[in-house]
Structure formats: C-alpha cells, structure tokens
Image (spheres, rainbow, N blue to C red):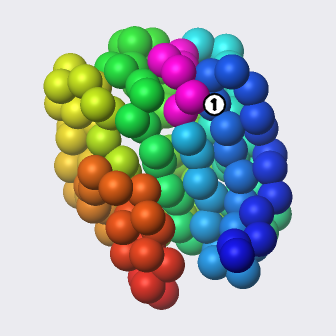
Amino acid sequence: MRKKIFIVDNDMISVWVYPEHHMIHHQMNSYCYGEKFYQALTKGAEALERYHATKWLSDNRHNGALPAEDAVWTEKNWFPRVKAAGWRHWAVVHPEKVVGQLNMSRFVKKYGQLGINARTFSDVDEAFHWLDAEI
C-alpha cells in the first residue's frame, strides 16, 4: 500500500503527497476553479518543496477547461515556483470532456517545452506507474 499524506481534501479537489515516491498527486473531485484551485495548488507546491518531490500526478478526469484567469495564475505564479523547487516529471490523466482535454493538452505541450517531462494518460494507475519509474 502506498503511504499518502493528505494536504487538501474538499468537495472540489484533493491533494496528497507520496513521500517515498517523491510525488504530489491531485484529484479533481468536481469542476475546480478560482480560490479553491489556487489554494490547493499552492498547498501542493508547499508539499513539493517540503518533501523534495520532483513528480506531479494530475488526475483531472472530473475537471473541465480552466478559466483564463486560472490559466494565467498557473503560468505566472504556480509554475515558476514548482519548477524552481525541482518539479521535473508530470503525468496527466485527461478530463473526460473534450474541451478539458484540449485545454490540458496545451498545458502539457507548453510545460514540456519549458523542461517538464510530461505525458498524458487515461488511467490513473498507469500514470502513477510511469511517473514512479521516472528518476
């Protein structure tokens, strides 16, 4: 069994860390945006720093496209912080809705160009195993 420490757990999003895997994992529980989105990703960034994680698993199956202001916030605030803290590998489980898939594909491509080893999946366990094998 994987040891996990919950960082955030609410109706919109859950975030936890697997310390022995150097991995942050978030799961969208419903469409997540705005303040709860910012708070959860900020707590995830703090955990990435604290546990010296280099991997992030994004389970976005229950999310849609990010609002433009949330996308700007991730690019200007969250991404520079986690990149500087050592984030290197990203497994993304795509949203179920096509509009969300297109949105996440743009982030995967963009962050890939900025040095993040990123890959998309349709299965959470497959994403975890791929990410866990990355050094």
Q: Which picture quadrant has residue 2?
A: bottom right
95 up-or-down from 46: above or below: above
For disc 1, the neighbor class at 10 Å (few under 14, some 14 to 19, many from 20) is: many
User: In this image, 99 relative to 38: left or right?
Assistant: left
Kind of residue at disc 1: Ile
| Helix, strand or loop for the magenta stretch, by majority | loop
| Residue drawn where x is 43% and y is 82% of the image | 134
Say if the magenta span includes residue 90. Answer: no
Residue denoted by label 1: 13
Q: Tag 1's secondary structure?
A: strand
Q: Quadrant of residue 47?
A: bottom right
In x, y percent, where is residue 94? 30, 41
Q: Nearer the viewer, residue 126 or 74?
A: 126
Residue 16 vertical position relative to residue 67 in the rendered view, above or below: below
**Residue pictured at 18% horizontal, 25% vertical:** 98
> Where is 37 relative to 24, above or below?
above
Q: Which residues are magenta?
A: 28-33
Image location (x, y in percent) of residue 104: 29, 36
Residue 128 in view here = yes
Q: Residue at x 21, y 49 (%)?
A: 109
